[in-house]
């Protein structure tokens, strides 16, 4: 039987926030911002030059952060 990490947008957003914290802890990104709105969350990450930021939906941010963290942990 599969064990899902998230089952709705709220739990997906929480897992995405955890991945963001892990990415900062691993020094993969310098920072990230979570904007909380009544009906959704928005994740803002720095771009490659760290001069601007771009904002993503929870699913987009989850996939990006998961890829970053997984690739960093697989190199250890």
Image (cartoon, rainbow, N blue to C red):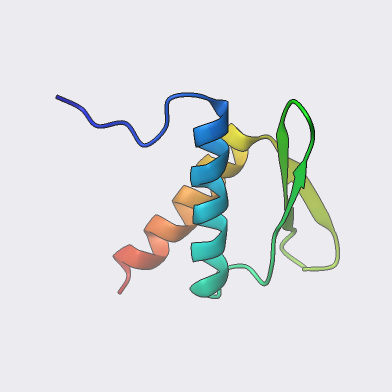
Nearer to me, 74 or 57: 57
Nearer to me, 74 or 5: 5
Count of all numbered marks drawn on residues in the image: 0
Question: Image point 70% across, 60% down: which residue?
Answer: 32
Q: Residue furthest front?
A: 38
Q: Position of residue 74 (x, y in %)?
A: 30, 64
Q: Position of residue 18 (x, y in %)?
A: 51, 54
Q: Position of residue 59 (x, y in %)?
A: 57, 33
Q: Position of residue 35 (x, y in %)?
A: 78, 46
Question: Image point 75% across, 59% down: which residue?
Answer: 47
- Quadrant of the image for the N terminus? top left
Res. 5 image quadrant: top left
Residue 51 shown left or right of residue 64 in the figure:
right
Question: Image point 57% across, 31% down: which residue?
Answer: 10
Residue 31 shown left or right of residue 60 in the figure:
right
Q: Does 75 appear above or below 33? A: below
Q: Does 43 appear above or below 29? A: above
Nearer to me, 19 or 48: 19
Residue 28 shown left or right of residue 66 in the figure:
right
Q: Does 30 appear above or below 55? A: below
Q: Residue furthest right?
A: 52
Q: Residue furthest left?
A: 1
- Quadrant of the image for the C terminus? bottom left
């Amino acid at each position: 039987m599969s064990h899902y990490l998230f089952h709705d947008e709220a739990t997906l957003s929480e897992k995405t926030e955890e991945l963001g914290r892990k990415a900062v802890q691993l020094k993969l990104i310098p920072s990230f911002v979570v904007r909380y709105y009544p009906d959704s969350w928005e994740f803002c990450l720095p771009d490659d030059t760290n001069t601007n930021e771009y904002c993503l939906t929870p699913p987009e941010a989850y996939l990006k952060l998961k890829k970053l963290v997984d690739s960093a942990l697989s190199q250890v």
